[in-house]
Amino acid sequence: MTHHDTLQELLADPRVGKDPQLWTTFREGRLPEGWPLITFVTVPGMITADGEDHRRLRGLVTQAFTPRRVAALQPAVEARATALLDRIAELAGGSQGGSQGGPEGGFDLREHFAYPLPMHVIGELLGLPPKQQDELHELSDTLVSSSATPEAAVAAQRSLFALLASVVAAKRAEPGDDLTTALIAAREDDDRLSESELVGTLLLMLVAGHETTLNLITNAVRALLAHPEQLRLVLDGTVPWSAAVEETLRYDSPVGQFPLRYATEDIPVGDTVIRRGEALLASYAAAGRDDAHFPDADRFDLTRQPNRHLSFGHGPHFCLGSGLARLEAETALRLLFERFPALALADGPAPEPIGSFVSNSVRTLRVTV
């Protein structure tokens, strides 16, 4: 599903489901062992549930993942971003914005800013031990990789589930003021999350809660620096930072594709018929560049109105963490360019794209300040 209007329609179509048992290939056992995307298809939780089961799971999570809880994170996001920028100033050889010093070739903004900010935030939100956060990130990177070997994919899945199960056990023994503890206690008609659903939900929040925002911040900085006339619009106050975030979400979606959905009956789409039991792949990156919906779609334009992209999904599976991602990205961009108004892309070859079917960004983003 690559066209915006088709994608929007099918994401909300009741004839499209998320339960992998609806997929003929999966149900008949025809997927190869170690298929790299198997976790996205089988992980217990709301992204593989439909109907009442999905509403139950989403309702339980919503009780703990409220807009009020997200809004309360604003001071912590700003404090963490400021601390990271202080460290970057040291790396660059200067303590204030505008410094032109720094190591030859600049430094990797993705490694030193775009990654640690959302990882710290989601780690604090979920109550993840700091010493485990880098390991969880590396495992989630393997999980979303399309180039991982079958053995690496299986090992990463097992290690992630084991690590998150240990976090759940620790929070049961010593509850904290965090989302994991809240999810353990969350009820809807006295219906708690099962153990597998709880771990699956934490896995979803871990991956979506930092991989997506990491890519969003990276892609936004890259696009703004490549289009200085657009950067000027936000720096002089012509448009707000939210416009930069929304246009990046459309122009260079942090999620390229997200697997999978399945037809519960034959669905005519134009001159094509999606057959019952076939899998559908949502291509958010392609939909954002659909000229039929976004005039001159390949142009990065912060004044674009309307800009109703689908990068956070649509319908019953719309991303619960969209508010947090927007808060983090807007805060990160504002503070970054306030501190370093002379930020620029470093000289050298174009950065390599991530080798992922799901995650859409570049491996590194070298910049100078």
Image: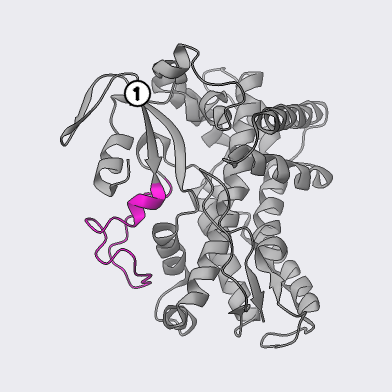
At 63% across and 34% down in the image, what residue appears?
203
Residue visible at 44% across and 73% down? 240
Residue 166: x %, y % from top left: 79, 28
Residue 341 is one of the magenta-drawn residues: no
Circle 1 crowding by C-alpha within 10 Å: few under 14, some 14–19, many from 20 = some
Front residue of 329 and 65: 329
The residue sitting at 46% across, 85% down in the picture is 236
Report if residue 306 lies within the magenta region. Answer: yes
Where residue 195 sits: x, y (%)? 66, 20
Quarter of the picture containing the C terminus is bottom right
Query: What is the basis of the colouring in this image?
Result: one colour
Compared to residue 204, the image places residue 162 above or below, namely above
Left or right for 92, reference 24: right
Q: Position of residue 91 (x, y in %)?
A: 79, 75
Q: Residue at x 54, y 56 (%)?
A: 361
Give residue 264's position: percent from left, percent from top.
31, 19
Q: Main secondary structure of the magenta part?
A: loop
Where does the magenta region start and end?
284-312
Name the secondary structure under disc 1. Answer: loop
Badge 1 is on which residue?
278
Q: Quadrant of residue 116?
A: bottom right
Quarter of the image where one finds residue 77: bottom right
Quarter holding the N terminus is: top left
295 displayed left or right of 95: left
Residue that sits furthest to the top in the current view: 28
**Does residue 75 lie above or below 227 as drawn?**
above
User: Count the marks: how many?
Assistant: 1
Instruction: Give above or below for 234 relative to 49.
Output: below
Q: Which amino acid lies under the numbered mark 1 shown in the image of this protein?
A: Glu
